[in-house]
Image: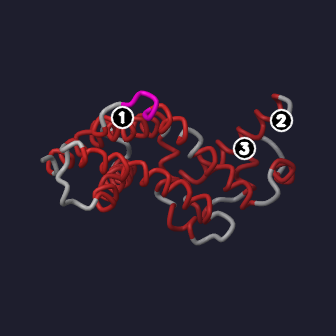
Amino acid sequence: MDNQLLDRKLSIILATVDVIDEFGLQGLSTREVAKRVGISEPAIFRHFKSKGGLLLAVLEHFSQYDSDIILSIQVKKIDPIKAITNFIDTYAAYYENYPAITAITQSYDIVRCDPYLSEKIQSIFFTRINFITEMISQAQKNGQINPDINSQNLATVIMGLQRESCLNWRMQGYNFSLRKQILSTLEMVLEAFKV
């Protein structure tokens, strides 16, 4: 694929994220995306077979760094508590630098109900939560987190604090540091479950 085609495809994906951010998933129209990119609506379908295909590409874009982030943490063999913090911090920084992408985190349940997209959204969700669960289990084995705590439940709390912080940030017009909010809340949660 040549660079111009890749650039056009990426610009369509980024415009789609912006439209979802501005109008919500229910307000997404390929006409609006085409207008923002400066192409005709049928031109979108030369790159994506359907609106569902476009949304799948958006989810791919949203999760493109997941495996790299996890691999980087695993290669460094860092302490599991630091691994959790590093993992969450990486996403917090990404979201703070690209606020529109947080619209995707707020659309999980809507997207999950679409048979064309449900497998991808479940993959994203479970990859992230399973990594946190694994780190919590390791921290429990290391005597850093109370072993009586269900690691899956604590992982859900951690992922939930990130998602709710993003929603709060969006609702308040991005008027505080998302990264500071998420990291201070994460530190409080991890401290509460220390041994």
Q: Which residue is mark 1?
A: 86
Label the magenta part by its dominant secondary structure. Answer: helix
Q: Is residue 49 left or right of residue 27?
A: right
Depth check: give the residue in front, 67 or 140: 140
Q: Does the stretch in magenta take in 128? A: no
Callout 3, which amino acid? Answer: Ile
Q: Which residue is mark 3?
A: 12
Q: Quadrant of residue 51?
A: bottom right
In whole angstroms, how far apart are the C-alphas of marks 1 and 3? 31 Å
Q: Quadrant of residue 115?
A: bottom right
The total number of labels drawn is 3
Circle nearer the N terminus (1, 2): 2
**In percent of the image, x 72 and y 44: which residue is there?**
12
In the image, residue 116 sits, relative to residue 185, either above or below, namely below
Q: Give the x, y percent position of residue 179.
A: 33, 37
Q: Which residue is mark 2?
A: 5
In whole angstroms, how far apart are the C-alphas of marks 1 and 2? 35 Å
- At label 2, counting other C-alpha atoms closer than 10 Å, the crowd grade (few under 14, some 14-19, many 20 or more) is few
